[in-house]
Image (tube, rainbow, N blue to C red):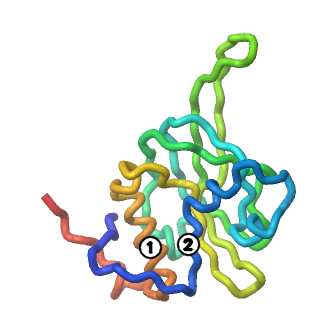
Amino acid sequence: MTRFSSRTKTVCPAWCCTARCTATAAKGWPKVATPWFEFTGLQTTTIGAQKPIAVSYVDTDNAIVKGLENWTTINEELYNNEVGHVQETAHPLAHGKQDYESKDKKGQVRKIISKTVVVWTNLYNGKARVFGTTLGHTTDNLRRCQDLDLVTAVCSGACDKLDAAHMKPAKKST
């Protein structure tokens, strides 16, 4: 179901959309929870290769992702989850899985399979609703309907507009 619509043009500050900021700011950070990681709800510190990521929604009843279908990105960096889970205040909405081959220091090729949270919500300090995703590093990815559907749903949720009256499928364009 495609939800993206030109009618969704505003973002309400009720939700802080961390999006790519989570992963970008994490490079070189310590391996302990910092205020930034507590805010975003996910502790990320490294990235994978520029390869497609299989995205699968894990809470399909959540209003943000309800009706969205699993999909695979084009080449994209999969950011790891340093501690293996989201913070206690966060809730995963989708996982990403990436398979690729890499050479180790001895030149041996090894298969890498990484799976981590790529879409989530967080309640920071019991007040601030935070949405996070580590997807969307390239303009080409952000042009795809799946990314636009997710962003539309987040913006609609920020404005408390995740209802049938506001989440109508867009007309197919040619």
Q: Distance between the residues labelled 1 and 2?
A: 12 Å
Q: In which quarter of the image is the C terminus?
A: bottom left
Does any portion of residue 93 appear in the rendered image?
no
Please say if 155 is above or below 108.
below
Please say if 44 is above or below 150.
above
Does any portion of residue 63 appear in the rendered image?
yes
**Kind of residue indicated by mark 2:** Cys
102 relative position to 143: left or right: right
Q: Quadrant of the N terminus?
A: bottom left
Q: Where is residue 143 in the image (x, y as percent from the top left)?
A: 34, 55
Residue matched to label 2: 17
Q: How many C-alpha atoms fall within 10 Å of the one at disc 1: few (<14), some, or many (≥20)?
A: many
Q: Earlier in the sequence, mark 1 or mark 2?
A: 2
Q: Which residue is drawn at 36% across and 49% down?
A: 140
SS assignment at label 1: helix
Q: Residue furthest right?
A: 32
Please say if 131 is above or below 10.
above
> Residue 22 falls in which quadrant of the image?
bottom right
Residue matched to label 1: 153
> Residue 134 falls in which quadrant of the image?
bottom right
Task: Tell which of 70 and 49 is nearer to you.
Answer: 49
156 relative position to 6: left or right: right
SS assignment at label 2: strand
Q: Residue at x 59, y 42 (%)?
A: 97
Q: Where is residue 163 in the image (x, y as percent from the top left)?
A: 42, 85
**Kind of residue indicated by mark 1:** Ala
Q: How many C-alpha atoms fall within 10 Å of the one at disc 2: few (<14), some, or many (≥20)?
A: many
168 relative position to 116: left or right: left
82 relative position to 117: left or right: right
Q: Which residue is drawn at 43% across and 86% down?
A: 161
